[in-house]
Amino acid sequence: MTLESLQKIETDPLLAERLDAFVGRFGRLQDNLGDKLLPQLLDAMAETTGAAIENLDRAEKLGWIDSADTWLEMRKLRNQMVHEYIEDINILISALKAGHTLVPVLIDAAKRLTDQINKLAR
C-alpha cells in the first residue's frame, strides 16, 4: 500500500472493495478472538477472566498468543484502520502495512485457541 495506490481508491472500485474487506476481516478476527473467544475459553477452563489486558496476559502465559503487547498493537492498528477521519493518510498507510504483516499472528492465535477448544471437547 502506497500513497499512490491509496489515491486510486476513488476510481478503482476493486481496490476499494479489497481494502474494505481487509480492514473489516482484520478487525473482526482480532476482535472475535481477543474480546469474545478468549474470555469464554478462559472461563471454560475455570481461569479467572478480567479486563482485556489481563486476559491477554493470561493467554500469553498459557501459550495461546506470543505477546500481549503485540495483541494490543493489533487493536491499536485496527482502530487506526477503521477510523475514516484520519487526517494524516500516512498513518492509515502505515497501519495497513503493519496490519498486513500481523495477519500470520492472528492466524496462529486462531489455530492455538482452536487447538485448546478441541482439547477441552475431548
Image (cartoon, rainbow, N blue to C red):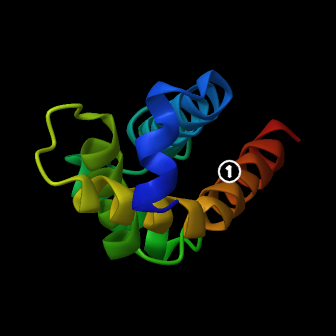
Where does the image place residue 9, in percent across and percent down from the top left?
A: 49, 34
- x and y, in percent, of residue 8 in the image: 50, 40
Q: Residues within 10 Å of mark 1 (few under 14, many from 20)?
A: many
Q: Is residue 49 visible?
A: no
Quadrant (top left/top right/bottom left/bottom right) for the C terminus: top right
Counting labels gives 1
Compared across the picture, whether 72 is left or right of 41 comes to left
Name the element at disc 1.
helix
- 3 vs 90, nearest the viewer: 3
Residue at 35% over, 66% down? 94
The residue pinned by badge 1 equals 110
Q: Quadrant of residue 21?
A: top right
Is 108 on the left or on the right of 28, as rendered? Answer: right
Q: In percent of the image, x 43 and y 37: which residue is there?
A: 31
The answer to which of 98 and 74 lies nearer the viewer is 98
Left or right relative to 39: residue 120: right
Residue sitting farthest toward the right:
122
Q: Nearer the viewer, residue 105 or 90?
A: 90
Q: Please indicate, yes or no, whether residue 21 appears anywhere in the rendered image.
A: yes
| Residue type, mark 1 in image | Ala
- Residue at x 40% of width, y 59% of height: 3
Q: Is residue 23 above or below residue 72?
A: above
Residue found at x 42% / y 51%: 47
Q: Position of residue 81 (x, y in %)?
A: 34, 44
Measured from the top left, where is residue 46 in percent x and y?
A: 47, 45
